[in-house]
Amino acid sequence: MIKGQNTTGTALLLAAAPTGKSRLINATGVLPTLAAVPPSTLTGTPAGTIVELADPMDQQTVLTRVRAAAATPGPLSLLVTGQLQLDARQRRLHLALARSTPATLRYTGLPWDWLVGELKPRLPDSTRVIVDLVAAPDAWPEISAYGLTLGPGIALHGRVAPPPARNRPAAEPSYLQAVATLWRSGLNPPPGELHARAAAQAGHDGALFLSVDGAPAPVAVPLAAMTPAAMAPAAMDPPAVAPAAPAEDALPAILSLAHVGRHGEAAAHAVQWERWAVRTHGAGSVEAVHWLEVRADLAHVSGDAQASCELWMAAADARLALHEAPDSAGVQAAVDRAHHQWQQLRDPGRAAELGPRLASLRGRVPGRPGASEAVRRRLEFLRTGALTAGQ
């Protein structure tokens, strides 16, 4: 159930994917099962209004429907299935619509940030979003590295699957199908339990599973006006010998510093905690690697792609040194994030300097199909460009 005073809710069912060979998911395949679910279950209220968009073609039409649904005063449930792509020019994430192609995505797809913007004004705890999405090859590295969000106050559950292999049929929205089947059977467990059961039935297959309960982010409270000393000093500054619990308390405060623009302070505290982990648990320990990855993420948030790339590569090396398998989720994520940050480097010299190390890692951790080849091609381009410039 969604929290709220109103007894009438709204559910918007959006199933969208391009037509033809570029379709990666049979998005509309789940709609018949959802149609058999009582409206009150879909909306979480005694009475509900259902709006269905099946393979829409026009981004403005979809935006209008989303805007109207978001403007309703009662609880809102948004169920979305389809495929995510990046437009080549601005690198913005889009939900591809029926007429979308890579060349026309900016004009024929629904930008994800439009969806974020329409939901932002809604009251906290009044909105739940359930997604079952497939990422196109260009979008998967970014999504697998940094996830998918809709902002504070929005409950988000679901999954984003990697692109299916070439010459494979379009994927089925099996996560949302599992949700719909549970609802149709008369079961309506709490959101967390519903998510866990649907995820188990859908299977993992390298997918990214999302479970955000909609609680406001730490930035939503007035942390910007606080001094570091006011933000749990015992947790922010590790003593010479500290128990494990304060380290868990430190992370939210450190991330809050970063998200209000105090990147130097956040990085300094993360370095302190990494040193404490090395002193307490040893270099290369799981605890030390955790703080190394926190530093890598902080570098990304601050816009320092070079430092983030280097730190993620160090984290991948450390995980491999801990005998984690090259295909384990932690190792794969570290290398994927290093690769993504390397692609963001606009200085050819820096990219050429870091490229061989990344290529070596890709030799051990190939990742998605074509990733190793992408590193090799860019390195060759950087070398060719350098030779041309020097002639």
Image (tube, rainbow, N blue to C red):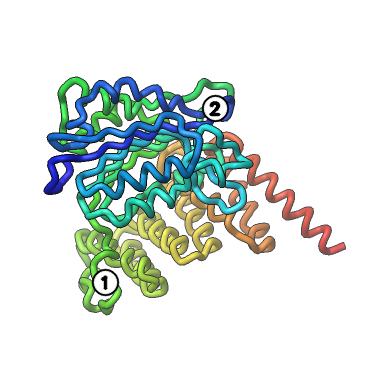
Residue type, numbered disc 1: Leu
Q: Vertical placement of 308 versus 7: above or below? A: below
At horizontal 27% and vertical 54% (from top left) the residue drawn is 122
Q: Vertical placement of 307 versus 72: above or below? A: below
Q: Secondary structure at mark 2?
A: loop
Foreground pick, 34 / 286: 34
**Which picture quadrant has residue 78?**
top left
Picture disc at residue 223: 1
Residue 203 position, x and y percent, is 35, 27
At horizontal 22% and vertical 54% (from top left) the residue drawn is 124
Mark 2, residue position: 19
Residue 297 position, x and y percent, is 42, 58
Q: Secondary structure at mark 1?
A: loop
> Is residue 185 shown to the viewer in this render?
yes
Q: Is residue 391 left or right of residue 366?
A: right
Figure quadrant of the C terminus: bottom right
**Which picture quadrant has residue 130?**
top left
At horizontal 55% and vertical 50% (from top left) the residue drawn is 339
Residue 199 position, x and y percent, is 30, 31
Check disc 1: other Cα within 10 Å, few if <14, some if 14-19, many if 20+: some
**Which picture quadrant has residue 107?**
top right
Check disc 2: other Cα within 10 Å, few if <14, some if 14-19, many if 20+: some
| Sequence-first disc among 1 and 2 | 2
At horizontal 41% and vertical 37% (from top left) the residue drawn is 160
